[in-house]
Image (cartoon, rainbow, N blue to C red):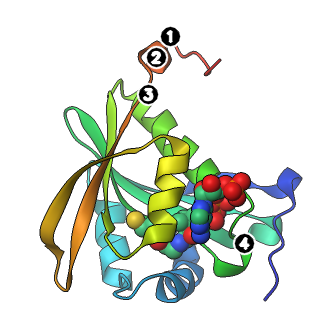
């Protein structure tokens, strides 16, 4: 199916169970070991986790990001964009949303892991400003991972009250 991602219709909302069928279709098209419904529902119920869903025209799911808040960092657990909608800046929008959530919680870091074979995702995170920190032997059952870190610019760590937009 072609991508309909008219900019004026894009919005990012909290996960609802009704999004799940489209999320699972994107997930299966994106990862060698996709999450199942139970994994998404467990994150949706987890007290420090959040799933943000990028919707396009007619409420179609175009992508999503799953992350948890810890003491010092937001940990990005999953992020994907529908295959037909890639290279249009939608992944970047989702990452900006994750960074904004870190800013609001006054957390200085966003961390994530990527499969060593997933060069597209590594380029994507590096283009955004993430730094590769460390190889993680056996992080995935069948493969090593890379740990990536993004430092939320200090001037941008606002919190709700003193929120400031990036320059
Ligand atoms: C990685 C992913 C989320 C990127 O989403 P996207 O919407 O295509 O990314 P964007 O269009 O916002 O890309 C922003 C920049 O990242 C870089 N980038 C993104 N995809 C890239 C690719 N396949 N190869 C090289 N660079 C890439 C580019 O610099 C791009 O800017 P440009 O298009 O102006 O050159 C998407 O490819 C995806 O869903 N992949 C499968 C799931 C996955 O691997 N998720 C990450 C797991 S850790």
Q: CA distance from mark 1 to mark 3?
A: 10 Å
Q: Which residue is mark 2?
A: 158
Front residue of 81 and 44: 81
Q: Which residue is mark 1?
A: 162
The first of marks 4 and 1 along the sequence is 4
Please, what secondary structure does the residue beneath circle 2 have? loop
Q: Are marks 2 and 1 in contact (CB under 8 Å)?
A: yes
Looking at the image, is 104 positioned above or below residue 33?
above
The answer to whether residue 85 is left or right of residue 143 is right
Looking at the image, is 109 positioned above or below residue 35?
above
Front residue of 111 and 49: 111
Q: CA distance from mark 3 to mark 4?
A: 27 Å
Give percent across and percent down for residue 43: 32, 64
Disc 1 crowd rating (10 Å Cα; few below 14, some 14-19, many 20+) is: few
Q: Are marks 3 and 4 in contact (CB under 8 Å)?
A: no
Q: Which residue is mark 4?
A: 85
Discs 4/2, front: 4
Q: CA distance from mark 4 to mark 2?
A: 32 Å
């Amino acid at each position: 199916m072609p991508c309909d991602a008219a900019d004026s219709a894009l919005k990012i909302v909290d996960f609802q169970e009704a999004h799940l069928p489209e999320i699972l279709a994107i997930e299966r098209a994106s990862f060698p070991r996709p999450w199942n419904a139970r994994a998404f529902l467990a994150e949706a119920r987890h007290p420090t986790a959040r799933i943000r869903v990028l919707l396009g025209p007619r409420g179609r799911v175009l992508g999503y990001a799953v992350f948890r808040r810890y003491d010092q960092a937001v940990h990005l657990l999953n992020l994907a964009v529908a295959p037909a909608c890639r290279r249009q800046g939608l992944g970047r929008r989702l990452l900006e949303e994750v960074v904004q959530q870190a800013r609001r919680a006054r957390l200085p870091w966003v961390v994530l892991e990527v499969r060593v074979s997933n060069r597209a995702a590594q380029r994507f995170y590096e283009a955004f400003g993430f730094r590769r920190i460390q190889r993680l032997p056996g992080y995935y059952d069948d493969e090593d991972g890379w740990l990536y870190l993004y430092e939320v610019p200090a001037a941008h760590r606002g919190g709700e009250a003193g929120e400031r937009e990036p320059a």
